[in-house]
Amino acid sequence: MQPTETDVPLDDAAPPGPPSDQPRLRWYQSIHPPVFWPALIIVVSFVVLAIAGGDAVTEAIGTLQSGIVGGFGWYYTVIVTGFVVFALWCGFGHFGDIKLAKGDEEPEFAIGSWLAMLFAAGMGIGLVFWGVAEPLHHFAGIPNRASGVGAMDEQGMEDSLVITFLHWGLHPWAIYVVVGLAIAYAVHVKRRPISIRWTLEPLFGGRVKGWLGDLIDVAAIVGTLFGVATSLGIGVAQIAGGLEFLEIIGTPSSLTLAILIGAITLLAVVSVVTGVKKGMKWLSNLNMVMAIGLLVFVLIAGPTLFLLREYIQATGVYLWELIRLSFSTSALAVTDGAGVEWQGWWTSFYWGWWISWAPFVGIFIARISRGRTIREFVLGVLFVPTVFSLLWFTVLGGTAMYREMFGEGGLVQTDAAGENSVHESNTLFGMLEGLPGGTVVAGASIILIVLFFVTSSDSGSLVVDMLASGGDPDPPTWSRVLWGALEGAVALALVFAGGLMALRGVAIAIALPFSVVMVLMCFACLKQFRQERQQMVAAQRALVRDRLTQHVSRTLIDEGLVEERPQRK
């Protein structure tokens, strides 16, 4: 789950929408103008400004990132940890029996298919990009040692994995639980359109139909689009790194990255235009098979017994240290702003990235979860992807660090200043090179990233389009093409505005307004769940009372103390 690129097409999980025999509206009638135009203007303005502004935009993004991390990093830490508590409370408390359906509707998907789709939602560019790179960064002390990883030794290996687990474990999936649960209740129980605004109806009532609801949906569109673009930018950087590793191209330049972004975005647009659901399903299934194949290959070809033992051990340490890690803000690392810098590189970046992805992934999860109880929802969404993510990082990251400690090394290098350095885009391929047949697998990994790019861009543009079309579950193709092209344009703009650092900065900044919406979602959910729980308890009490009354009446009649009244015809 990275932010997770959702690789199961959303088209097939749509809740009941307008009848398919209704005539298709004209293009200008198919949009919701108060949402569509402001979101479009914001996105296009950013693209133009980022490409034309050059170094000034790069500096502005860096300043914005430092300001938000320094001023609001603690806030991100508190609310994301709060989302974990909220998810666990809803799942294991007395709200867990509430059904995400109208009446007694059965689950739309069998448990196996549902879990498989959740598993697919957790696979994507982010996991492939950071699977090796993040543990190695912590291991090498990049950007500094504020993480608490003291040195490149055995203890440092385990600490590096545990910190990575924090960023890819329960916390990000709790973010998706909040949004997915709120949307699922609004869509499947209240029968509202697919739109973020309706999740706050319990708090604001009819006002969500006006400017307030429009503002919420605009924030969701912009956040989602920038979150998807961040993943696409990262994916293209890794594709370029793989092509360089295979000696197909030289050192990637900005022009090279721009060509790659354009080419792969074109593939995504073609996928949108064709709209072949079976084809998209085939690509999604192929993604899963290739990702699992990569995992199994590294597990078998790498230090297998060490990886299996370390998976169990590091998972135990993660669970034991979970509370301490959840509230860590690197507050005591004050020398040269090391703590703020580290948070901006890692935890604050990730929390912002996940929050910006939350509308996209939340809508996907909500749409496939009709008929599930809240307890089933939380168990499936929070724990199943977490278990797989921890295994993924143990196998890929653990193999890389094992090579650094006990093998030929070479993945952690030294820059001109004598500091440790890790090439984010190339570490996966460097690790694979040291395994038997790794060069062939490296080539297959590039194909895997491209497929993730295409499927996630298609699904992402669909979600954004639904929001911009007022909740229409089947928005027109032309607007999906538009938003898909804009995702590529934003990724291109961010690459020109500073590459990975710009991607980090924008993800942190863009999540700030939507984080407020998510906090309000929690209160809205609790208000609705409490009301439904009270109705359930009242109905159960009435049923018990009626049965008791019938039992007493029958006893009195049987004992001859009262006469049975004849039934009326």
Image (tube, helix red, strand yellow):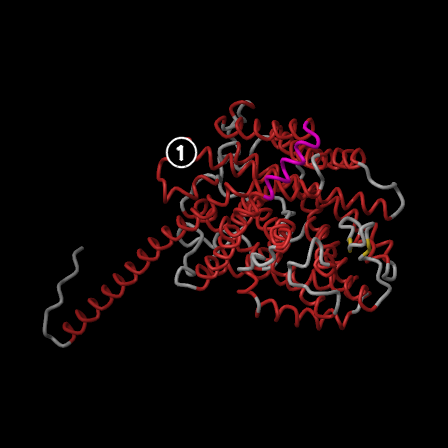
Residue 262, position in %: x, y?
Answer: 75, 33
Q: Which residues are magenta?
A: 53-66
Residue 235 sits in which quadrant?
Answer: top right
User: Which residue is drawn at the image coordinates 14% and 72% (left, top)?
Assistant: 557
Frontmost residue, 569 versus 96: 96
Report crowding for label 1: few under 14, some 14 to 19, many 20 or more residues within 10 A (C-alpha).
Answer: few
On whether residue 59 falls in the magenta region, the answer is yes
Nearest the viewer among 399 and 113 is 399
x and y, in percent, of residue 526 in the image: 39, 53
Main SS of residues in magenta: helix
Q: Which residue is mark 1?
A: 209
Task: Name the residue at 68% across, 48% down.
Answer: 284
Q: Quadrant of the C terminus?
A: bottom left
The answer, for residue 141, to whether it is visible in the render is: yes
387 with respect to 300 (left or right): left
Q: Amino acid at mark 1?
A: Lys
- Say which quarter of the image contains residue 555: bottom left
Where residue 113 sits, quadrant-wise, is bottom right
